[in-house]
Image (cartoon, rainbow, N blue to C red):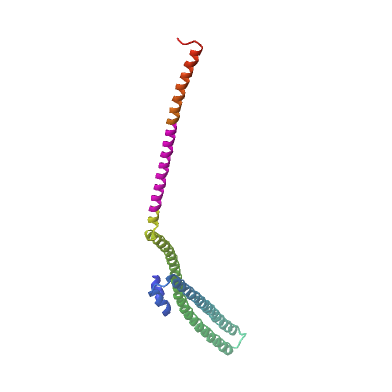
């Protein structure tokens, strides 16, 4: 049985309208399950009562049949006593007749109890079938409800994620990232520029030092020649 079909049978106009508008079907389904469980409890109670009536009718029938057999045995004993001379034949016949009447009465009660037992057994079988159907329906509903809850959880999570993804451009996140990339590129270019400037400064200093060094070497050569001349070592 489909969940919505069962919900439509709850009989409450509010639930009916809510289902049509798809307003929280999970809560309505849970309420439907609670109603079904109450129906199941009532059906089980009714089934137990009917089965008790079957048992009572069976016991009553057995009791009536036992009494009927007992009265028949008493009639036989009365006739036997009369045959032996222990009891007057007329009295034996009268009492035996009464015993047979009691036997017939109890047999009639036994037959009535058997009819009632058969009727109660039929009712119990129908109730038992209804109970089994109700149990199967409840089990099916519970499984469908679990599936429905899982689908709701997944759909809610999916909707949240998709909403976040859909709002990325509108919230300016992509544009912000682009601006950040541009700013980082500018900073990197500026760093390279400073590096080149620093390298150029070092190169100029090296050239200056080299030039100064060459001048120093020339002066030292001149001083060496002057010293040699003073010592008379020049050729």
Image x and y of residue 161, in percent: 41, 60
Residue at 47 percent of width and 80 percent of height: 115
Image x and y of residue 113, in percent: 50, 81
Image x and y of residue 72, in percent: 54, 81
Main SS, magenta region, reads: helix
Q: Is residue 149 visible?
A: yes
Judged from this view, the residue extending furthest toward the front is 230
Could you say which is closer to the camera, residue 161 or residue 181?
A: 181
Could you say which is closer to the camera, residue 188 or residue 14?
A: 188
Q: Is residue 55 left or right of residue 201?
A: right
Residue at 46 percent of width and 79 percent of height: 119
What is the quadrant of residue 167 in the picture?
bottom left
Could you say which is closer to the camera, residue 194 or residue 54?
A: 194
Is residue 175 a member of the stretch shown in magenta?
no
Image x and y of residue 132, in percent: 45, 71
- In the rendered view of the protein, which quadrant contains the C terminus? top left
Could you say which is closer to the camera, residue 220 or residue 167?
A: 220
The magenta-colored residue range is 178-206
Residue at 42 percent of width and 77 percent of height: 15
All told, the count of numbered labels is 0
The correct choice, above or below, for 85 with respect to 34 in the image is: below
- In the rendered view of the protein, which quadrant contains the N terminus? bottom left
What is the quadrant of residue 67 in the picture?
bottom right
Q: Is residue 11 visible?
A: no
């Amino acid at each position: 049985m489909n969940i919505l079909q069962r919900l439509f049978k709850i009989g409450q106009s509010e639930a009916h309208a809510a289902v049509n508008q798809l307003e929280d079907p999970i809560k309505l389904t849970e309420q439907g399950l609670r109603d079904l469980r109450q129906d199941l409890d009532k059906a089980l109670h009714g089934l137990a009562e009917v089965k008790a009536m079957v048992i009572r009718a069976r016991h009553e029938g057995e009791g009536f049949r036992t009494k009927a057999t007992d009265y028949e045995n008493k009639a036989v004993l009365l006739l036997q006593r009369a045959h032996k001379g222990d009891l007057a034949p007329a009295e034996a016949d009268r009492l035996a007749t009464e015993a047979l009447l009691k036997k017939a009465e109890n047999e009639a009660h036994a037959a009535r109890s058997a009819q009632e037992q058969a009727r109660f057994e039929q009712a119990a079988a129908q109730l038992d079938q209804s109970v089994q159907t109700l149990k199967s329906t409840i089990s099916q509903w519970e499984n469908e409800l679990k599936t429905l809850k899982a689908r709701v959880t997944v759909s809610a999570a999916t909707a949240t994620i998709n909403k976040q993804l859909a709002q990325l451009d509108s919230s300016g996140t992509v544009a912000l990232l682009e601006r950040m990339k541009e700013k980082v590129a500018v900073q990197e270019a500026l760093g390279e520029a400073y590096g080149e400037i620093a390298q150029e400064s070092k190169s100029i200093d090296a050239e200056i030092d080299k030039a100064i060094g060459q001048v120093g070497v020339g002066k030292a050569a001149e001083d060496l020649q002057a010293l040699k001349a003073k010592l008379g070592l020049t050729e």
